[in-house]
Image (cartoon, rainbow, N blue to C red):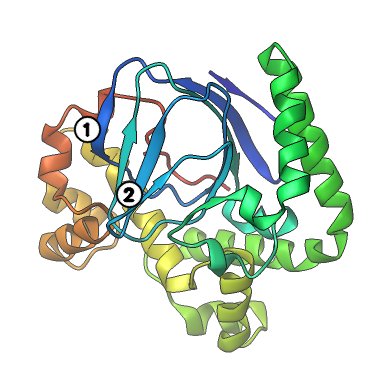
Amino acid sequence: MQILPSASLAPFIKNYTIVTIEKDLDNEVFYPSGYVDLIINISGGFAATIINGKQNDTPAIELLGHLTLPTRLSVAKGTSVLIARIYPYASALFFSDPLSEFTNYATDMYDVALGENRDLYDQIMEKNDLLSKISVLETYFLQKLKKNETRLKKVSIVQNLSQELFRHHKQLDLPFLAHHSGLSERYIQKLYLSNIGISPAAFTSVVRFNKSLDLVLNTTESLTTIAYDNGYYDQAHFIKEFKKFTGITPSASRNSMLKNDTNLQHAVNIGF
């Protein structure tokens, strides 16, 4: 079940999703989404992410940063989570920067700010219905937005850079982006690392991966066609990039039943 944010938060929050796992999942492939997710465990059930071989049990509140490494997911049947999916350019409005500190980590938010996040969790859990829980979360985000208003200009710059990048190019052309925006290549790199958490090149790769992933899972197009249509040099380049993010090949992903398993899966295209 997905619920859209309020008008004030719509430019920064993609949606809120409530997910209840209907069967045990063990060591399932977890795809990089290109978003940053704030995940609230509202059932007390067990869930864990395995990133770079390290297991992180899902705490009360978790911030899942950008993923660029093969990742696995284990979840116990009956576990319910509330997910706030944040646009990649907007994360710095709600969390401490640089966002690169959260990349390839599932961070326990109690370790970031214990009192604040414990209060947030307690307020969410005091509410009995989903809309009331989301209302608490919206209040939290609006307070953060007001506190970090000075970051809005840089966030807007990163958003515009990303829109320009994917309007014209399937591959990163940093010199073009710098010339078109009037910013230096070094400054663009710094903006992405601070406000998104990964470099422009890595971000481009994640977005391209997600676009190709949708075709792998939901069409019968050949891998060669998918590769060329999404800006990969050839099928070998596509397979290499796909395995870098997931640890498996595109054909293995297509042949698996993973696409039918759970809405918690991060196979979601980026939309600006």
Q: Earlier in the sequence, mark 2 or mark 1?
A: 2
Task: State whether residue 84 is above or below residue 228.
Answer: above
- As drawn, the label of residue 207 is none
Task: State whether residue 214 is above or below residue 125.
Answer: below
Residue ID at (37%, 44%): 49
Q: Position of residue 251 (x, y in %)?
A: 11, 43
Q: Amino acid at mark 2?
A: Ile
Residue ID at (48%, 22%): 19
Task: State whether residue 173 is above or below residue 46.
Answer: below
Task: State whether residue 267 is above or below residue 198.
Answer: above
Residue under label 2, please give it. Answer: 50
SS type, badge 1: loop
- Left or right side of 131 for 214: left
Residue ID at (44%, 77%): 173
Q: CA distance from mark 2 to mark 1?
A: 29 Å
Q: Nearer the viewer, residue 206 or 42?
A: 42
Q: Position of residue 257 (x, y in %)?
A: 18, 27
* Crowd class of label 1 (few under 14; some 14 to 19; many from 20; radius 10 Å): few
Q: Does residue 10 appear anywhere in the picture?
A: no
Residue under label 1, please give it. Answer: 219
**Image quarter for residue 125?**
top right
Q: Amino acid at mark 1?
A: Thr
Q: Position of residue 67 (x, y in %)?
A: 41, 56
Q: Position of residue 77 (x, y in %)?
A: 35, 18
Q: Does residue 197 appear anywhere in the picture?
A: yes
* Crowd class of label 2 (few under 14; some 14 to 19; many from 20; radius 10 Å): many
Q: Nearer the viewer, residue 223 or 23?
A: 23
User: Of the residues tagged 2 and 1, which is closer to the observer?
Assistant: 2
